[in-house]
C-alpha cells in the first residue's frame, strides 16, 4: 500500500504544526486555509505561527507540503484532519462555528471514501453527531503545548483515537500514518476520546491548584515552594513531569475551556463539579497576586508610579496572549506611567495602549516597580545590578523566579516571587526591624 496523502483543513497553530510534522515523517501533505493572504505568507516563508523550530521544519520538508486557499487542494487526500483552532470566550466556552464552517467548505471536495479526522478539541457528542459514514469518521486527541508544539507534534507520547466501534481495526490509512510516529495508539469510542483530553487537562489543573494553594501558604509561613518541588518530583505517584509550579492563574485558553465544559456538563446532567468550581476560584485568587504586591509595595504610597511590565505573552515560547496574566495586570493598574516589553508580542497586538520599549533594560528606566510577567529566557540573564542603576524604585515582582533572590537583594532591590516570602535588600530588612 502506498503511503496515504494527508490533508489539513485549517492552518493556524494546530494545523500548521501537525502538517509540518506529518511531512517530516515522510507523508505528502496538503493544507487548506480560507484566507488567501494567510496562505501566501506561509508560501513566502513568513509563518503566521511562532513556535521554536517550526520555520526550519517547514523549510526542510517544503517539497512534501502544498498550501492553498482553495479547498480543492484536498481532493486527492486519503484522509483530512479538521485542524482549526477553537476560539473561546472570557468564560472559557468554545465557539464551534469555525469547525462546522470548515467542514461545510471542504466536504464537497473530498473523495467519497476519504477519512475525516476531527483533530480540534470538541465537547463529547460532537463527532458522532456529524452526518458522515462512521467507517470514515474519526476523532483524534491533540496534545500540543504552546512553546513546545513542534516536539509534541513530532514525538507524541501516544495517540488517542475516537471511533464508532473501537473493536473494529482502524482504517489502514489512518493506521499507517499513526504508526510512523512509533508510539502507542489507543482506540476508544468517540465520546471517550473527546473526554480523554478534558480528563488530562483536569488532572493538570488539579496539580496546578494544589501547587498554588501550598505555595501561598509557603509565602506566609516562611517556607520556599521551590525547595519542596524536588521532593514531589521524586515521588513516583506524582512524578518528574508533573505540573507543580505555582502560577498566576490559568491562562492560554485550553484549561479554562475544559473546566467550563466540565461545569456545563455537570449542570446539564446533574453531576457534581464542586472541585472544578474550586479550581476556578483558586485561579482567580492567584491571578491577582502581582496586583496585590504592586498595590501594597508601591501604588499605596505612589499612586502615579512608573511601572515596567516585562512579558505580554501568557507563557514563554508563544505569541498567544489568551488570558495572559500580564494583560490582566495592565487592565487593572492605575499607574501614571507604564512601559512594556515582550520579544514576540507587540503592545498594539495586545489591544492595550502602552508604550513599548525596544529592550528590557530600556523598559525599566525610571521605574518604581518592575514585573517580570513571562518567563522568557532572555529575562533570566538580566543582571539585577543593571536593574538597580536604571530603576527609580526598588520593587522587583518576579512570580516565576527568573532572577536569583539573593542577587536581587544584593543589588539593593526587594524581590517578590510565588511560593516564598519576599527577599528584601539588607537596608530594607534592617528598616523593617527598627
Image (cartoon, grey):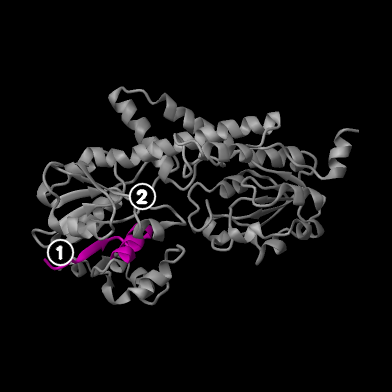
Percent of width and height locating residue 38: 36, 68
Q: Where is residue 417 in the image (x, y as percent from the top left)?
A: 67, 43
**Which label is found at residue 101?**
none
Q: Residue 143 carries which label?
A: 2
Residue drawn at (43%, 40%), measured in percent from left and top?
A: 256
Mark 2 vs mark 1, CA separation in Å: 28 Å
Give the number of the mark in front: 2 or 1.
Answer: 2
Q: Is residue 149 above or below residue 203?
A: below
Residue 330 sits above or below residue 217 on the image: below
Secondary structure under tag 2 reads loop
At label 2, counting other C-alpha atoms closer than 10 Å, the crowd grade (few under 14, some 14-19, many 20 or more) is many
In the image shown, does 140 or 248 lie closer to the viewer?
140
Magenta residues? 1-22
- Residue 243 x %, y %: 49, 41
| Res 245 quadrant in image | top right
Viewer-closest of 195 and 23: 23
Q: Residue 109 carries which label?
A: 1
- Magenta run includes residue 19: yes
Q: Quadrant of residue 75?
A: bottom left
Q: Is residue 381 visible?
A: yes
The relative height of residue 308 versus residue 187 in the rendered view (above or below) is below
On the picture, is 363 further left or further right than 409?
left
Q: How many marks do you count on the picture?
A: 2
Amino acid at each position: 500500500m502506498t503511503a496515504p496523502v494527508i490533508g489539513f483543513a485549517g492552518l493556524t497553530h494546530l494545523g500548521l504544526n501537525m502538517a509540518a510534522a506529518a511531512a517530516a515523517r515522510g507523508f505528502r501533505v496538503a493544507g487548506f486555509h480560507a484566507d488567501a493572504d494567510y496562505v501566501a505568507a506561509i508560501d513566502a516563508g513568513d509563518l503566521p505561527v511562532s513556535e521554536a523550530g517550526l520555520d526550519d521544519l517547514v523549510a526542510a520538508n517544503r517539497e512534501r507540503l502544498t498550501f492553498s486557499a482553495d479547498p480543492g487542494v484536498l481532493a486527492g487526500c486519503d484522509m483530512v484532519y479538521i485542524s482549526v483552532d477553537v476560539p473561546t470566550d472570557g468564560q472559557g466556552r468554545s465557539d464551534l462555528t469555525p469547525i462546522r464552517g470548515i467542514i461545510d467548505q471542504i466536504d464537497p471536495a473530498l473523495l467519497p471514501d476519504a477519512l475525516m479526522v476531527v483533530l480540534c478539541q470538541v465537547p463529547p457528542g460532537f463527532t458522532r453527531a456529524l452526518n458522515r459514514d462512521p467507517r470514515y469518521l474519526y476523532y483524534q486527541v491533540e496534545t500540543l503545548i504552546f512553546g513546545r508544539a513542534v516536539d509534541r507534534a513530532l514525538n507524541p507520547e501516544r495517540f488517542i483515537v475516537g471511533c464508532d466501534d473501537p473493536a473494529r481495526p482502524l482504517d489502514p490509512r489512518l493506521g499507517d500514518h499513526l504508526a510512523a510516529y512509533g508510539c502507542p495508539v489507543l482506540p476508544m469510542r468517540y465520546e471517550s476520546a473527546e473526554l480523554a483530553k478534558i480528563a488530562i487537562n483536569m488532572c493538570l489543573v488539579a496539580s496546578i491548584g494544589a501547587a498554588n494553594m501550598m505555595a501561598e501558604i509557603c509565602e506566609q509561613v516562611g517556607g520556599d515552594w521551590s525547595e519542596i518541588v524536588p521532593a514531589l518530583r521524586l515521588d513516583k505517584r506524582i512524578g518528574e513531569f508533573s505540573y507543580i509550579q505555582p502560577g498566576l492563574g490559568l491562562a492560554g485558553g485550553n484549561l479554562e475551556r475544559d473546566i467550563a465544559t466540565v461545569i456545563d456538563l455537570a449542570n446539564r446532567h446533574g453531576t457534581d463539579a464542586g472541585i472544578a468550581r474550586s479550581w476556578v476560584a483558586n485561579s482567580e485568587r492567584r491571578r491577582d497576586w502581582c496586583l496585590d504586591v504592586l498595590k501594597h509595595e508601591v501604588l499605596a504610597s505612589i499612586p502615579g508610579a512608573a511601572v515596567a511590565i516585562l512579558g505580554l505573552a501568557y507563557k514563554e515560547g508563544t505569541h498567544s496572549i489568551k488570558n495572559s496574566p500580564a494583560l490582566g495586570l495592565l487592565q487593572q493598574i492605575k499607574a501614571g506611567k507604564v512601559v512594556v516589553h515582550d520579544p514576540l508580542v507587540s503592545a498594539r497586538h495586545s489591544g492595550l495602549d502602552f508604550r513599548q520599549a525596544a529592550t528590557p533594560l530600556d523598559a525599566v528606566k525610571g521605574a518604581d516597580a518592575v514585573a517580570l510577567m513571562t518567563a522568557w529566557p532572555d529575562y533570566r540573564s538580566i543582571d539585577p545590578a543593571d536593574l538597580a542603576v536604571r530603576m527609580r524604585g526598588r520593587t522587583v515582582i518576579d512570580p516565576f523566579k527568573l532572577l536569583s533572590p539573593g542577587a536581587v537583594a544584593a543589588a539593593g532591590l526587594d524581590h517578590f516571587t510565588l511560593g516564598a516570602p519576599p527577599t528584601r535588600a539588607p537596608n530594607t530588612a534592617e528598616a523593617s526591624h527598627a
